[in-house]
Amino acid sequence: MDSLYVNKAVAAALTAGIAFFVTGLLGDELIRAPAPSKPAIAVALPEPAAPAGEQKTGPDPIAPLMASADPAAGLAYTKTICVACHSFNEGGKAGVGPNLYGILGAPHAHMAGFDYSKALKAKTGPWTYEALNEWLYKPAAYAPGTRMSFAGIPSDKTRANVIAYLRSLSPNPEPLPTPTAAPAKTAMAAPAAAGGVEALAQKEGLPPLEPLLAKADPEAGHAFTKTICVACHSFNKDGKAGVGPNLWGVVGAPHGHMEGFNYSSALKSKQGPWTYAELNEWLYKPSAYAPGTRMSYAGLPNAQMRANVIDYLRTLSDHPEPLPADASAAGGAAGTSAPTPPPAANQGGPAAGTPEPAAKSP
């Protein structure tokens, strides 16, 4: 086939293609179909309901939650979330955020030398319980313009736990806040002050302690204190105070029995020794036994476990206090034996569930 003929055929095909393309472009420009003002078929969709969580404009008051807050749970949370930016030990260095030791009750810009945002510098007054509550709920709302990128803690319980832990980061923790509206707690505290040590037990319907002590297991009490109480207390003879006092020799000792420990005014006002009945009421609900106490532990509702803990505390002495007469008689009738004295050094004991007292004075 003649090559000239082939070239003519290819040129003709290309010319036709170009002409078709140009014609299409001109047609699109000259004839435009207007977009419809509304769709031909309208499908009505329901308005999406706002999530329940978005309807909440702020945190619940923190004061009613602090009595049951768990500082150990707060510590666990901070270890998971907060240590990326903050340190918590006394004298600790700043990271992305400031050191937080002693923050409760301190000024907003409490760490000298740290470059706080203008939003935080503009905040006056101390970090109160409610200020921390609002800050931890949503930092960006509490201090618009803050450099804190953390979104916040929506759970009221978790915030209370974290604040309880921050409260413990001080040699003299701030007193727990008093709920402004707590009629049940007020009614419960009043009889205790007016009616003596048995008033709270009668008000709450606590079972008699003596039969429980008769069958108490001090080893079970020891195990409980090692799980709950060692976060704040020591139990060995001549042990040092932590957030709470050492508890060696507490049974039968004065309420403020550890020399040098800074007891709350609520405990200092208590007269007489720690009797079995006093310990029972204290362990049941510290905030009701001594309103204003700095003890953040909510209490130990299980009656037999309270007796176990008290029996364990009883063993923390070179000369354990005798059991109440009723308990001794019941124990003898049941064939139970008195608990054996503890080893020379006991570690583990009531911190969250035991009195503020600690080492027995000579």
Image (cartoon, rainbow, N blue to C red):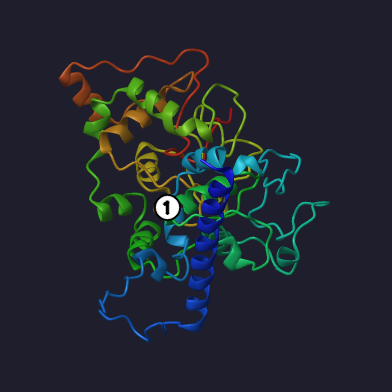
How many callouts does the rendering have? 1
Q: In this view, does 164 lie to the left or right of 181?
A: right
Residue nearest the observer in this picture, 229 or 97: 97
117 over 210 or under it: above or below: below
Task: Name the amino acid, label 1.
Answer: Lys
**Residue placed furthest toward the right:** 113
| Residue 235 pos. (x, y %) | 51, 26
Residue found at x 27% / y 74%: 45
Residue 91 sits in which quadrant? top right
Residue found at x 22% / y 17%: 336
Residue found at x 36% / y 70%: 50
Q: Is residue 327 left or right of residue 226?
A: left
Residue found at x 42% / y 60%: 64
**Residue placed furthest toward the bottom:** 37
Where the C terminus falls, by quadrant? top right
Residue nearest the observer in this picture, 125 or 358: 125
Badge 1 marks a residue whose secondary structure is helix
**Residue placed furthest toward the front:** 2
243 over 287 or under it: above or below: above
Residue nearest the observer in this picture, 224 or 87: 87
Q: Crowding at label 1, few (<14), some or many (≥20) Cα neighbours within 10 Å?
A: some
| Residue 154 pos. (x, y %) | 45, 57
For the question of whether residue 244 can be seen, the reply is no
For the question of whether residue 203 can be seen, the reply is yes
| Residue 11 pos. (x, y %) | 56, 55
| Residue 54 pos. (x, y %) | 41, 67
Query: Which residue is under mark 1?
Result: 157
